[in-house]
């Protein structure tokens, strides 16, 4: 899912990706040679991370560096990249901007990129494999009240209009902040008031560690409230749309099994 663009070179031979998960997707589709530039956050796969030109971060791309690379296609994302910078990049090369807010959006994005880079068959096979993997997820009928934290100081969570929220739903979990928009700041007190049973601490963008889980556990213990189960989870599995979804389904299956183990402590699943 993204905007319609007209390419000067078809298929594109010099691609710059400004989105980590879509960089990984381009690799999966067999476009290592065509990808000439990536961001410093495009850490997968390591072969691209080590060998391709880096053009800044997702929020502060180096416009002049991109211009010097003479791309014939730039791949961006509405949420991850800055609108004003995207508008500048339109003066350099065609810019395709994805907008992914749920599972179906992600599959449509894969299809669109496949068409854009003339890898339709590979994209179709990937979509079919992802759909099959997710169809095998087994969840309980009980929707566990869950808070998913992405940031600390202040604590931030995810609203119901995000891709991560849809992944929580695939796991059979109930986001207690589903009525919020995007990524609101919240407090541990609010989490306590909503009778939360599970807190998931993401490994990104804030790298939650066991000490942070212990802090939250102590907060609930000191307030004499029931202590939710607290797990540190792999944020890439919840937020990277694209080929990573192929592995996410198996990760979610293991996570679901772990959540319902009869213990009240936290464990590291990142």
Image (tube, rainbow, N blue to C red):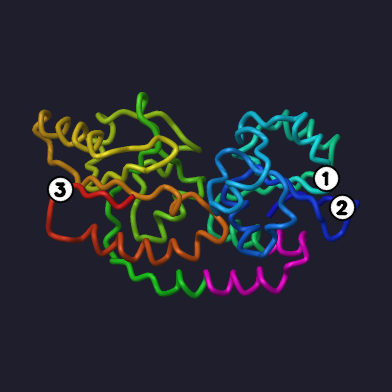
Image quadrant where residue 124 sits: bottom right
Q: Residue at x 49, y 75 (%)?
A: 132
Q: Pick out the residue farthest to the right.
A: 8
Q: Are marks 2 and 1 in contact (CB under 8 Å)?
A: yes
Image quadrant where residue 18 sits: top right
131 vs 268, left or right, is right
Circle 3 packing at 10 Å, graded few (<14), some (14-19), many (20+), is few
Q: Residue at x 41, y 44 (%)?
A: 178
Image quadrant where residue 121 sits: bottom right
Query: Magenta stretch containing residue 154, yes or no?
Result: no
Gap between marks 3 and 1, in whole Å? 50 Å
Circle 1 packing at 10 Å, graded few (<14), some (14-19), many (20+), is some
Q: Residue at x 29, y 38 (%)?
A: 209
- Residue 94: numbered disc: 1
Q: Are marks 3 and 2 in contact (CB under 8 Å)?
A: no
- Residue 265: numbered disc: 3
Q: Earlier in the sequence, mark 3 or mark 1?
A: 1
Q: Nearer the viewer, residue 161 or 254?
A: 254
Q: Earlier in the sequence, mark 2 or mark 1?
A: 2
Q: Nearer the viewer, residue 20 or 174?
A: 20
189 vs 11, left or right, is left
Q: Is residue 2 above or below residue 110?
A: above
Give the secondary structure at mark 3.
loop
What is the count of numbered marks? 3
Question: Residue 255, image x and y in percent?
Answer: 30, 59
Question: Residue 96, image x and y in percent?
Answer: 75, 48
| Span highlighted in magenta in the image | 111-130
- Residue 7: numbered disc: 2
């Amino acid at each position: 899912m993204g905007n319609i663009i007209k390419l000067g070179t078809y298929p594109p031979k010099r691609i710059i990706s400004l989105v980590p998960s879509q960089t990984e997707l381009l690799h999966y589709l067999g476009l290592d040679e065509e990808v000439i530039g990536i961001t410093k956050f495009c850490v997968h796969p390591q072969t691209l991370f080590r060998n391709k030109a880096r053009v800044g971060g997702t929020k502060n791309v180096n416009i002049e560096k991109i211009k010097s690379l003479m791309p014939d296609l730039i791949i961006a994302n509405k949420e991850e990249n800055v609108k004003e910078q995207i508008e500048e990049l339109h003066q350099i090369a065609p810019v395709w901007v994805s907008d992914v807010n749920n599972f179906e959006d992600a599959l449509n994005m894969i299809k669109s990129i496949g068409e854009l880079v003339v890898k339709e068959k590979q994209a179709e096979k990937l979509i079919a494999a992802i759909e099959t993997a997710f169809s095998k997820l087994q969840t309980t009928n009980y929707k566990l009240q869950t808070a998913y934290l992405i940031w600390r100081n202040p604590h931030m969570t995810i609203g119901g209009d995000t891709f991560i929220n849809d992944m929580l739903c695939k796991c059979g979990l109930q986001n207690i902040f589903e009525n919020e928009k995007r990524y609101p700041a919240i407090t541990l007190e609010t989490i306590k008031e909503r009778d939360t049973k599970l807190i998931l601490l993401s490994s990104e963008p804030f790298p939650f560690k066991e000490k942070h889980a212990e802090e939250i556990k102590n907060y609930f213990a000191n307030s004499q409230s029931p202590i939710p189960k607290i797990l540190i989870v792999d944020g890439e599995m919840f937020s990277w749309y694209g080929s990573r979804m192929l592995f996410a389904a198996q990760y979610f299956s293991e996570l679901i099994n772990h959540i319902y183990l009869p213990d009240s402590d936290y464990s590291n699943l990142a």
